[in-house]
Amino acid sequence: MREFWLTSGHLMLDRAAGGGLLMSNDLLKVYFMRPELAPPEDAGPAERALHATLMTDPQRTVSRSEIAAIEDADARENWERMIAFRDHLFAHPTLEAAYLALVRKGVGRTPPLFLNQLAHLILRNALDNCDDPFVLRAAELFFRAQRVTVHDGALLAADEEQIAGVNPAPVSPLVSMLGIETATEIDVMVEENAASYFERSDRYDMALDLTAGRRGHQALARVIEAWVMHLLHVEVEVEPLTEVRDVNLTWYVGLDAEGTKIGDLLWNGEALDEALSGRVAALYRLKFRDPAVADPAVKGEPVFLILAISAEKVLRVKPQNLVTGLPIRHLEAVT
């Protein structure tokens, strides 16, 4: 097995007997080292004291009065959210169970960044034995926004942070700890350079061709299958569609907010204008290997998955929609 996604922090975690990831103090310390939490030079004594004690004992109880005593308002809010997130993670047997609880019961004030980092770790676990770089690159869509463009007839997705140049390195203290260099240019993944993904997977500097019928389009289907199997213990077959004919939209799941909006319009019998139709980045047909696990309301019909581009040409996949949106008649036991 070739290593990838070192900055996910998966090497700091052990697995439970059921295969889920166990939260660790070492990974928690990485969170505490984030720039939002590490005390700046002008930090007050209360903020410094809290940080120092948690770096020594990451799971110790933190009272509301300790957080209230922090001098800076932004720091108080950051620590309030961090401690709530920490407590949620350790209240569940695995990170997978903690993620499921969050997306099913409501994420509340959990920062989207934390949800993305959980998806990153969970996918690293689910794809542990994957040796297909196209699948691994497609999986990045589950936890990193993508800037989309059409070039020579191809629909290309590149990492939004890399393109924007706001934060070219992954948002993680592990980057500097591991000595990973930031990218200098973006390459489109093709057969000839795909193998280089493993040595550059933490740089997010390879664009993916999502054109219907091509490797990237097909690879995202494999990611969806792995995600559903790992989290829900349900086997599904996801078929990439290159065109839509006689679609019976009995059930659909938007893979992002834009895809949900388009699905809602189609569900209500409204026609898509040319602009909206052009924003559909990918369409899939999902079938359950065992029809008995599906809600009877589906009546054996497939589920359609819709991925769409925002007006700003950005893809922001919401993998939690597959957890909450698929018509499954039972809840799995995650261990």
Image (tube, rainbow, N blue to C red):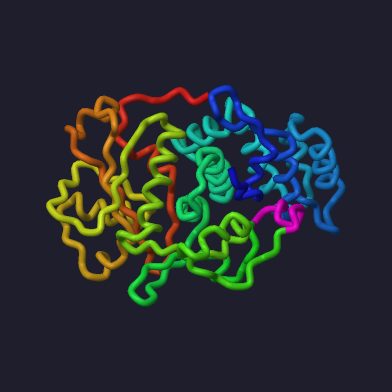
Residue 202, image x, y percentages: 62, 56
- Which of the two residues, 320 or 60, is positioned nearer the viewer here? 320
Placement of 289 over or under 114, stated as above or below: above
Question: Which of the image's four quarters has the N terminus?
Answer: top right
Tally of marks:
0
- Which of the two residues, 224 or 167, is positioned nearer the viewer here? 224
Residue 175 inside the magenta-drawn segment: yes
Query: Which residue reaches farthest left?
Result: 246
Judge from the rendering whether residue 272 lies leftward or rightward of residue 169; answer left or right. left
Judge from the rendering whether residue 36 lies leftward or rightward of residue 301; answer left or right. right
Residue 176, image x, y percentages: 75, 57
What residue is at 58 percent from the left and 22 percent from the top?
17
What residue is at 57 percent from the left and 60 percent from the top?
196
Image quarter of residue 331 = top left
Query: Which residue reaches farthest front?
Result: 192
Query: Which residue reaches farthest bottom?
Result: 152
What residue is at 24 percent from the left and 29 percent from the top?
291
Per the rendered image, the range of residues in magenta is 171-179
**Residue 122 in sight here:** no
Residue 118, image x, y percentages: 56, 42
**Residue 293 in sight here:** yes
Residue 125, image x, y percentages: 55, 38
- Which of the two residues, 156 or 43, is positioned nearer the viewer here? 156
Judge from the rendering whether residue 72 lies leftward or rightward of residue 17; answer left or right. right
Residue 6 inside the magenta-drawn segment: no
